[in-house]
Amino acid sequence: MASDKEFVDFVLDQIEIDAKITAKSMFGEYGLFADKKIFALICDNKLFVKPTMAGRAFIKDVVEAPPYTGAKPSLLIDNRMEDRKWLSGLVRVSIKELPEPRPRKKKSKNR
């Protein structure tokens, strides 16, 4: 089941941090980005934040689940979605710990 655009917009509206938060459609679901750094997935109208030590410490009572079959487990956020301050705090500490995206290789002009 694909995620609803309304749910994605709700999640984006809940996150208030000093970075540009965007959602990109990916295989019928969505990746969430802080500037160019991916920090979460939305699959089946559920939010999955990439696992970090800081994120686990922030949540305390962690629930992990894979966002899709074959994926590594992520931090499943289900019961605190309405708490804008809490969710923004989780995203803030998580993105600090995530690595910067690798530079993309330039396409060759000799094709």
Image (cartoon, rainbow, N blue to C red):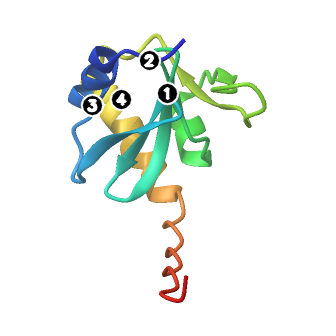
Q: Which residue is mark 4?
A: 87
Q: Earlier in the sequence, mark 3 or mark 1?
A: 3
Name the residue at 54% across, 11% down.
Answer: 1
In space, the residues marked 4 and 2 are separated at their CA atoms by 19 Å
Percent position (x, y) of residue 48? 54, 29
Name the residue at 52% across, 15% down.
Answer: 44
In space, the residues marked 1 and 2 are separated at their CA atoms by 7 Å
Q: Earlier in the sequence, mark 1 or mark 2?
A: 2
Q: Which residue is mark 1?
A: 28
Q: Which residue is mark 3?
A: 12
Which corner quadrant of the image does residue 25 belong to? top left
**Labels 1 and 2 touching (C-beta < 8 A):** yes
Name the element at disc 1.
loop
Percent position (x, y) of residue 109? 47, 87
**Labels 3 and 1 touching (C-beta < 8 A):** no
Task: Left or right? Give the position of 89 relative to 85.
Answer: right
**Labels 2 and 3 touching (C-beta < 8 A):** no
Task: Left or right? Give the position of 77 relative to 63.
Answer: left
Q: Which residue is mark 2?
A: 3
Circle 2: residue type: Ser
Circle 3: residue type: Leu
Relative to 20, say whether 70 is above or below. Answer: above
Relative to 11, say whether 110 is above or below. Answer: below
Percent position (x, y) of residue 12? 27, 31
